[in-house]
Image: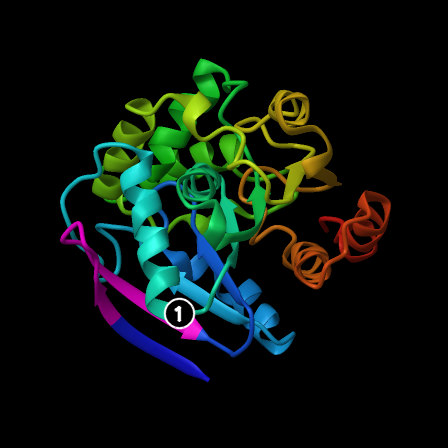
Amino acid sequence: MELEERIQTPLGVTLALRTVGEGPPVLFIPSLGRNVADFDDLAARTARAGYLALLPQPRGIGGSAGPAPTDLFDLARDVVAVIEHASAGPAHLVGHAFGNRVARAAAALRPDLAASIVLLAGGGASPPTPEVRDAVRGATRQGLKPDVQRLEDLALAFFAAGHDPRVWLGGWFPAAAEAQVAAGTATDTARWWAAGPEAPVLLVQALEDPVAPPGNAEALSRAIGERLRLVRLAHASHAILPEQPRAVAATLIAWFRGERNAATLQTLMDAETLTPG
């Protein structure tokens, strides 16, 4: 079952929401300046596994509109509004790249609504190099920077060797990206870093990711200890979703079903990881 609707939040935000499937809720939050359609394949697999996929568009993208967020917690309140609208109880929160920050902020804001948190390319503490940071910004500037240059940016910051960056040449919303960057800059990392007080956290660390390097995983492990399960994804960079869809889906569905053994999750991921070429 698939449904599209518009919901209004207490902050005066209109959110375009698509839901797929039935069952326990899983809410997806996309990367910087990206459309939530990046999760379409994963959401479909999740729905077939017996879950309700919640796919809200971020502000400024795909029919969602509202004032510029003042900080990450404004965006976290959008997440809370969607879960409450769905009346589905605590949700698994899946945040990709920038979305991992919003997921953690939502779990900190309303821990009662976070069944678990999944961080795909979870950064925030160990910054990328200036060259990589510039490439991220360049990639977001669809319509504002020549595509041939943006392809170079995408290859540098988002895609592992052997993967085609053209799959992400479209789907960017520069104004939304700028607003999200400003919201992140205005928020003290310590307020969201631990992803709330108690929910289990799964971090998928891409081994070729220059934007969210392994130092972030190490810092999060020190901060939350046994709440964290870490799996390492080979042959992937910051994009993750278009690079290794099968491996991500198999691991996350096992996680949603309650698998908390890191070695088992790693075995599932390794078995489904595709080698480029």
Q: Which residues are magenta?
A: 6-19
Q: Is residue 68 left or right of residue 203?
A: left
Residue 18 lies in magenta, yes or no? yes
- The part of the image, by quadrant, that contains residue 134 is top left
* Residue pictured at 39% horizontal, 57% vertical: 36
Q: Position of residue 216 (x, y in %)?
A: 60, 24
Image vertical order of residue 52 relative to residue 60, above or below: below
Q: Secondary structure at mark 1?
A: loop
The residue lying toward the viewer, choosing from 200 and 22, is 200
Residue 204 lies in magenta, yes or no? no
Q: Position of residue 182 (x, y in %)?
A: 26, 28
Categorize mark 1 by other alpha carbons within 10 Å: few (<14), some (14-19), many (20+). few
Q: Is residue 190 left or right of residue 247?
A: left
Examine the rendering and report whether any part of residue 145 can be seen.
Answer: no
* Residue pictured at 45% horizontal, 22% vertical: 190
* Amino acid type, callout 1: Ser
Which residue is labeled 1 in the image?
A: 87
The residue lying toward the viewer, choosing from 118 and 192, is 192
Secondary structure character of the magenta stretch overall: strand
